[in-house]
Amino acid sequence: MHNNLQFYIDGSWVEPSSDAVLEVINPADGSVAGQVALGNADDVDNAVSAARKAFESYSQTSVAERIALFDRIIAAYERRMGDLAVAITEEMGAPQWLAEQLQATVGVAHFQIARAALADYRFDEPLGATAIVREAVGVCALITPWNWPMMLIASKVAPALAAGCTMVLKPSEIAPFSATVFAEILDEAGVPKGVFNLIHGNGPGVGNALTSHPEVDLVSFTGSTAAGVQVARSAAGTIKRVHQELGGKSPNIILPSADLASAVEGGVAQIMLNCGQSCNAPSRMLVHVDQIEEAIRYARTAAETWSVGHPSSNAKMGPVASEAQWNKIQGLIQTGIDEGARLVTGGLGRPDGLETGFYVKPTVFADVRNDMTIAREEIFGPVLVIIAYSDEEEAVRIANDTVYGLSAYVQGERDAANATARRLRAGQVLLNNANLDLAAPFGGYKQSGNGREWGPMAIADFLEIKAIVGLNEAD
């Protein structure tokens, strides 16, 4: 049992101001995995006050001092990698292989990338007679979800620390265990008092208090588009900067020049990884009408290789993160059936032999039109929809016909794929099942958010720009 009943504020573990707690459910079997304290506005005030006090000194530290801090954090993180993987499995159901090989390791990768970017970052540069100075924006509220806990925490904390900001982190109350281990890592690494603060809680109790707090200068939020709207409204009263990484319904255009079997299999793997609980998952597969039936056969075969089982087993997929998520996915699968899509494989209910826990069958739909609900809404589960197109013009039109614009994928001959990629309204386009580049900017167009994370551009989002006019005038 994990009992996360304290908050990390001003360099110490402290008692919450109330005794409200929430049971954290292990999605593998529905059992209680532990408890987490639920903070309130008083706890937010304490954490923000600590961050504000620490900002004056931490924002003035040198790049060399911050690089030394990063080295200590990376070393401490690597020592706790196993603890993080265990926590992630218990809180959100990632299979052990996924927790160990990706979920935990990607966090330290973000720190390594931010450290490299920091070493070369130009905080000051001349512009004629003027000096352009980039300074830390201030106290930051960092609000993260449950689907990739360490990736999403590290992708905010690392650039904020590199920029010289101080911060208050509110992780998801559904998956709080790994965030507590992360706070222990930063404490062990000697992050100065008040620079990093952790409060557990829900949106109404902590999230709203953070986003509306007059002493918070920036909000960095990752979550659903609906929640992002509320964050923006809450932050508007104090004109604070807000950057958000929100939902997606990413298209995956398979051009006729692609190796069809490889392209389809890769696309299926991308949507099934992490049970489809990735905002950038290629959930809409677009295939030329002449190849559609062959693609459907490949997709069925590929999806049925994705075994589902307890996270401690050798299964490729574990459960989705919560009962609420399971119910949402089941409802959208039913909607797909009701609206006339062809169920190729998977479907409603749990896989055979998994009567408890929040397990979903790897599911593929064909004969999908882009106006169907399952092609419009973010399912956030292991559900792929296949849509036919007649020519490239139609493929691009379908791909862009969405309120989202986080990611897109194109498979095919490189020059043709590149030409198509440049026509897609998305913040990141991956060609030919390329691996993610954690140094490349990540963020969305349209209702997928604003701002960019990952790599050097992430640091920029935590900086203000000051012009010192006349500094470089000739004597």
Image (cartoon, rainbow, N blue to C red):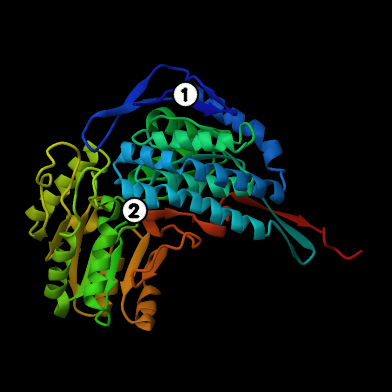
**Secondary element at image label 2:** loop
- Left or right of 304 in this view: 37: right
Q: Which residue is mark 2?
A: 279
310 above or below 16? below
Out of 180 and 395, give the one closest to the viewer: 180
Three-letter amino acid code of the residue under disc 1? Gln
- Left or right of 255 in this view: 339: left
Out of 404 and 366, give the one closest to the viewer: 366
Q: Residue at x 57, y 34 (%)?
A: 187
In the rendered structure, are the residues bearing label 2 and label 1 in contact, judged by CB atoms less than 8 Å apart? no
Q: Residue at x 45, y 54 (%)?
A: 450
The numbered disc on residue 178 is none
- Left or right of 270 in this view: 294: left
Q: Is residue 242 visible?
A: no
- The answer to which of marks 2 and 1 sits earlier in the sequence is 1
Three-letter amino acid code of the residue under disc 2? Cys
- Left or right of 52 in this view: 410: left
Rendered-image quadrant of the N terminus? top left
**Secondary element at image label 1:** loop
Q: Quadrant of residue 93?
A: top left
Q: Which residue is mark 1?
A: 6
Q: Residue at x 50, y 22 (%)?
A: 42
Indicate which label's residue lies in the foreground, 2 or 1. Answer: 1
Q: Position of residue 144 (x, y in %)?
A: 42, 42
Q: Residue at x 56, y 50 (%)?
A: 159
Q: Is residue 340 visible?
A: yes
